[in-house]
Image (cartoon, grey):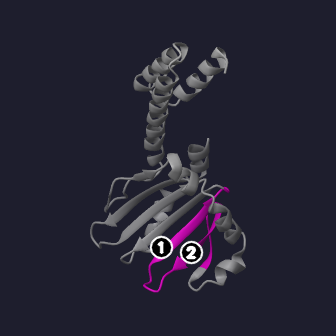
Amino acid sequence: MRRAQFLALLLTLATAAEADQVTDQIDAGLRAYEAGNARVAIQALQFAVAEIETQLSQKQLELLPQPLPGWSAEDAVSETGGLAAMIAGTNLSRSYRNDESGAGIQISITADSPLLSMMGMMMSAPMLMQAQPGSSPYTRAGFRGMMEKGDDGNLKITLMVGTRILLQIQGSGGATREALEAYLDAMNLSNLEKALLD
């Protein structure tokens, strides 16, 4: 790889990160590369990439809404990058609980999973959804999906956002449809695809 191409690649990686640990490691990698120490260069660049992925993950977690009034929430969780991302894509989740009733809601976002193509086929075929007991077609903000009602009465809303993002909101402990939809409305669904896939 030519020096100019190598520098361009490193600068591209650095644009999503702060100009301290990441750029320090990129500079160290470049110095090692120019000195002919390939192994040290690789280690430095791997550190920089890992730090960038961490920063991107933290940014993505902000897509999950803050708890609504009367609710509390656990910390948002991200599983992204590495082998897990190759198999299951990017996965974000957060759990919420109503302070008075104890009802629970969990929001899960999956992006770029190889399994999403099957879900997309189902969302495009309402007859398949209706064939499942307790399931029915569902739309929100122009996005198609389905609503499922379990034997315990709890609800689950699944939406396809574009073709590469699956959003699921699962209720428990008697969480109402209105509560689930309130959390849906607290999210910028149109922004999910841009924020996760750009």
The boundaries of the magenta stretch are: 136-163
Asked if residue 113 lies left or right of residue 46, the reply is right
* Residue at image mark 1: 177
Residue labelled with disc 2: 147
Q: Amino acid at mark 2?
A: Met
- At x 44%, y 37%, the residue is 55
Q: Nearer the viewer, residue 97 or 45?
A: 45
The crowd level at tag 1 (other Cα within 10 Å; few <14, some 14-19, many 20+) is some
Image x and y of residue 132, in percent: 61, 83
Q: Is residue 81 visible?
A: no
Badge 1 or badge 2: first in the primary sequence: 2
Query: In the image, is 22 to the left or to the right of 117?
Result: left
Q: Secondary structure at mark 2?
A: strand
Q: Which quarter of the image is occupied by the C terminus?
A: top right
- Amino acid type at circle 1 is Arg
Q: Residue at x 54, y 51 (%)?
A: 85
Asked whether the viewer can see residue 148, the reply is: yes
Around disc 2, counting alpha carbons within 10 Å, would you say few (fewer than 14), some (14 to 19), or many (20 or more)? many
Residue under the image location 67 percent in, 67 percent down: 118
Which label lies toward us, 1 or 2?
Answer: 2
Q: CA distance from mark 1 to mark 2?
A: 10 Å
The correct choice, above or below, for 70 with respect to 17 in the image is below
- Of the pair 125 and 185, the residue shown nearer to us: 125
Q: Are marks 1 and 2 in contact (CB under 8 Å)?
A: yes
State the residue at coordinates (67%, 69%): 123
